[in-house]
Image: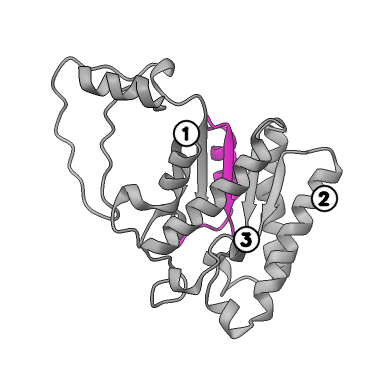
Amino acid sequence: MRLLEKIHQEQGLPFDPAVVRVILPYNKQTRFYNIQGDIAPPGSHQLPSRTLLTYGSSITQGYTASLPTGTYAMQLARHLSADLLNRGVAGAAQMEPAMAKMIAGAPWDMALLEMGINVFGTWDEETYSRRISEFIDIIVRAHPDRWVFCIDLYTHTGDFTCNPKTASFRNILQKKAESLQAEGYQKIRHIRGDSILDISSGLTIDLVHPANPGMERMALNLADRILKLTSPV
């Protein structure tokens, strides 16, 4: 512990060395038996000063990451020196109002919302526009002072087949973010997914889920974009 404290002080790490986090594997059955020892939940002074919440599909939850610590969401949180609340829901990111209310009530300082791939094959443009509008409104209007980053479709099959719905979904989300900015909500931003997962070699064979190099690229690109927007001038 003394060595960990020394490293913590010298490198200015965001987590107190006494904090231990158990990170579980993706999509595995876990049985909890008990916890023994002299332990307590960490205090706020032992955690990073800000929290990143991520919402989205299995891409955000981390389906194809080799390790739970290798998801783009967790790598992004590390680059931002932030704690992470990952609310990715594999195959089920359908922007329900109840989910938006849950996110609005969670303790976070900035939120990243990935919206699109789980409904790409089933929703038309009108449905997508209506659902993302209601979803974003609930979150942004509850916290006008917090940064909210809206991601459309990360690079996927539709980009290679030139599916017109891909461009439509991206334009719809961009216009929604711009309309809220025009209303005075200055901390909402739209980010094109293909500018974040910007290399086709970062994808797995299904041309939807990122491989490890894709996860790394996404985290770096997002961190660069977010830090430029949120850091004081």
Give the SS element for disc 1. loop
Across and down, in percent, residue 107 comes to 52, 29
Q: Nearer the viewer, residue 202 or 123?
A: 202
- Label 2: element kind: helix
Graded by Cα atoms within 10 Å as few (under 14), some (14 to 19) or many (20 or more), the crowding at tag 1 reads some
Name which residue type carries label 3: Asp
N-terminal of the pair, mark 2 or mark 3, is 3
Return the residue nearer the eye: 38 or 231.
231
Mark 2: few/some/many CA within 10 Å (<14, 14-19, 20+) = few
State the CA–CA distance, disc 1 to disc 3: 24 Å
Amino acid at the residue labelled 1: Ser
Please check the rendered image and state whether residue 102 is part of the magenta-colored stretch, yes or no: yes
**How far is mark 2 from mark 3, CA to CA?**
16 Å
Return the residue at label 3. Answer: 152
Front-most of 129 and 214? 214
Sooner in the amino-acid sequence: mark 1 or mark 3: 1
Identify the disc placed on residue 179: 2
Residue picked out by circle 1? 81
Q: Quadrant of residue 213?
A: bottom left
Vertical order, 39 against 196 (above or below): above
Mark 1 vs 2, N-terminal side: 1
Residue at x 29% of width, y 58% of height: 66
Residue 101, position in %: x, y? 59, 39
Of the 4 image quadrants, the one containing the N terminus is top left
The span picked out in magenta is 90-115
Q: Which residue appears at 16% of the width and 26% of the height? A: 35
Image quadrant assignment for residue 168: bottom right
Let me know if residue 107 is in the magenta part: yes
Label 3 sits on a secondary structure element that is loop
